[in-house]
Image (spheres, coloured by chain):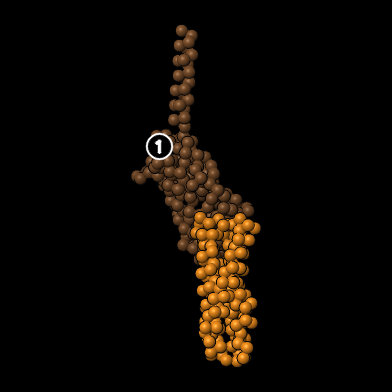
Chain colours: A brown, B orange
Amino acid sequence: MKKHFYAFAAFVVLFASAFTAFQSMDWKISENYSVKFDGGDPSGEFKGLKGTISFDPNNLKDSKFAVSIDVATINTGNGMKNTHAKSDKWLDAEKYPLISFTSKEITKAASGYQAKGILDMHGVQKEISLPFTFDGNVFTGSISVNRMDYNINTAEPNHGGQVMKVDINVPVSK
Amino acid sequence: MFKNDFTHGIIAGILASIAGIIYSHVYFFANEANFSSIVNVFSIIGLNVSACIVIAFLHAFSVKWLKKSAELVFNLVLSVLSFALIVVPLSITLPLNIQFPELFPGLVVPMMFFPSIAWLTINPVFSNPEK
């Protein structure tokens, strides 16, 4: 009887732990993600994406994004432009080292999902809606960001593009 | 006449290429910045030989049109062009998969001078002794 009890207990523990893993909403960001921006000139990408992604299509109420990118990792493909972009005239990487997004609410949308939250960039916090899809363990989204809304080089509104299209592609794993 | 300039250009191109290849290797070992998808043996040889052939044409036309002041004007134009070409590596936008674009001008800017240095180095060998 005792022998059967321990076998049964082991089975229960095994089953419960497997079920816990299955239920986990947390995802790890894979290395091959991309955060690309295109404003004509400049265009490029950011590296240094970090944060927590809790997402379950069947439990959107408890799903949440809290991610950031390192401003110093900006790459436009041109060294001078990179230095320029990180300077206090533009993104001011020294004073504002991170661009972060924290979701407040994730809802189902006509195609995919929509995350409403706060985008914190250059010391300005603004509420944005980020439409995204989640297919094959890959988050894909796209937003347009107007640098003038974030007080980025407002003295030169015509220097480079004002509106940047940001394409986000983030493969994740458990 | 152009045969002399052409030979001068080819040999200068080969010398500039050798200098470029050595410099690119030294630069890679010093900075571990890999730009080999853009600056490699083939592109270095191609660009240096092409540049030196252009210099040969420039020299031939200078001698033909300017006669006495040809060498002075040619050398001046060669220097100005070499300096002006610095703008090219500074303004070029590299593919995003290449890391450390900040280090790219350090590799290519000096190379802008290699064709003219090579040309002027062997100039005494090809200069017309009758002049």
Identify the residue shown where x is 58% and y is 75%.
B12
Type of amino acid at the residue the image marks with label 1: Pro
Q: Residue furthest top?
A: A1
Q: Is residue B43 visible?
A: yes
Q: What is the count of numbered marks?
A: 1
Q: Is residue A159 visible?
A: no
Work out whether A90 lies above or below A3: below
Q: Residues within 10 Å of mark 1 (few under 14, many from 20)?
A: some
Return the residue nearer the eye: B27 or B128. Answer: B128
Residue A30 appears at what percent x and percent y? 49, 43
Return the residue nearer the eye: A83 or A127. Answer: A83
Residue A3 appears at what percent x and percent y? 48, 10
Question: In what element is the residue under mark 1?
Answer: loop
Residue B3 appears at what percent x and percent y? 52, 83
Q: Which image quadrant is residue A116 in? A: top left
Residue A135 appears at what percent x and percent y? 39, 42
Work out whether A77 lies above or below A140: below
Return the residue nearer the eye: A50 or B94. Answer: B94
Return the residue nearer the eye: B66 or A41. Answer: B66
Identify the residue shown where x is 43% and y is 44%.
A139
Quadrant of the rendering where the C terminus of chain B is positioned: bottom right
Identify the residue shown where x is 53% and y is 42%.
A51
Q: Chain of mark 1?
A: A
User: Which residue is disc 1 drawn over?
Assistant: A57
Identify the residue shown where x is 56% and y is 72%.
B14
Q: Which image quadrant is residue B39 in? A: bottom right
